[in-house]
Image (tube, rainbow, N blue to C red):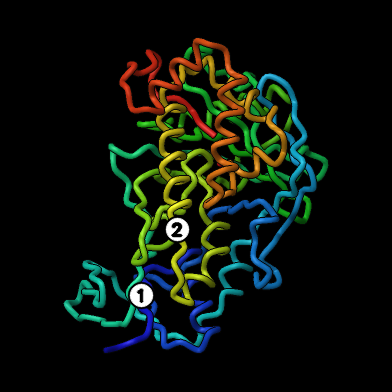
Amino acid sequence: MGAEVVVCGLGPAGRALAHRCVVRGMAVTAIDPAPERPWVATYGAWADELPEWLPAGAVAASVTRPAAWAETRHALDRAYAVLDSEGLRSGLVISGARVVAERVVRVERNAVTLASGAVVTGERVIDARGLARSPARAEQTAYGIVLRAADAEALFMDWRADNGANPLAPRSFLYAIPLGDGEFLFEETCLAGRPALGSDELRNRLLHRLSSRGIEFDANTRVERVRFPVEGGKPGRGRFGAAGGFTHPATGYSVAAALSAADAVAAGQSVWPASARAVHALRAAGLRALLALPPADVPQFFEAFFELPAERQRAYLSGRSDLTGTVAAMGGLFRRLPPRLRARIAATTLGIHVGSPATGPSAMME
């Protein structure tokens, strides 16, 4: 047998797992076609989700109480952290691992076949390569620009209708977070759609929104484009990160959940007890319901969510194995909605077809 652990993929989830295995003194083989490529995406996380071992320099900025706008403004009673992508990548040291710069073409329980035909074996093989795009999978898309705006308000989610979109069109929201050193990322986001809104449409909406708020920008600003599936991961011992079902379908977040679970997975523990699998199924049902909402009703849905007590919001957004809290949050949200939305959500949550919104894909909750 070869290595103790073979990790396929060196994105945030795979590198975190390889790092924690190396820290434990394990023999690790990490495989990625471009293991030193920089991470260009901006990763956000709730501060209380991040593990204590997170390397110094991994957090670029933090916000004590970010705001959320649905039909009204809500101050979220929970600290939010923006990760420094390069600080995180370089801090997840894997110098003790054997790194193979090749593409994986087949993953089995104790062996990995590479594009070259070589086979790498290990006592455990864990696939952390993320999820491939597919028309069958709902995706999150976003278009963002980075501006100097030290006094801007941090916005976890802003559904206000000042982005120039047709009121009957699929909804998108503004995500605005500090990056440190006076920089802010302003990002127009389609939370989930099948298909999701395209980059050109999101760009037009973002520029219209910023102009309507008197926020100045020019053609030389740094641009960030986002597109990834929010469904399709399968929980199991042989998969980790997005591939292993760690993406929250109602937010698109997965990095903090993977960082938090990396030590347990490295130790060979199961991170998918029955309660976590039940929460995973409930979140998938919630995604079905959100995708079925008519665009005009999306802000009302989130108004009800942000009216929930902070502990209920936290349970739904972060309680990966908190079945009691997740059920309570979903129940509390359901009771706050008007009867016509309750009927639609009840039907789609149970998998009963009620027809797609006439205007196309809907936006959802990160």
Q: Residue at x 52, y 52 (%)?
A: 321
Per the image, the residue denoted by label 2 is 273
Q: Residue at x 69, y 44 (%)?
A: 177
How many numbered markers are drawn?
2
**SS of the residue under disc 2:** loop
Report x, y in % for residue 324. 57, 43
Q: Are marks 2 and 1 in contact (CB under 8 Å)?
A: no
Question: In screen coordinates, is 188 left or right of 105?
Answer: right
Report x, y in % for residue 134. 29, 43
The three-letter amino acid code for the residue at tag 1 is: Ile
Residue 112, picture quadrant: bottom left
Quarter of the image for the C terminus: give it.
Answer: top right
Query: Mark 2, mark 1: which one is toward the viewer?
Result: 2
**SS of the residue under disc 1:** strand
Q: Looking at the picture, tell me which residue is in the foreground, 146 or 241.
A: 241
Question: On screen, 263 above or below 50?
Answer: below
Outermost right residue: 151
Per the image, the residue denoted by label 1 is 31
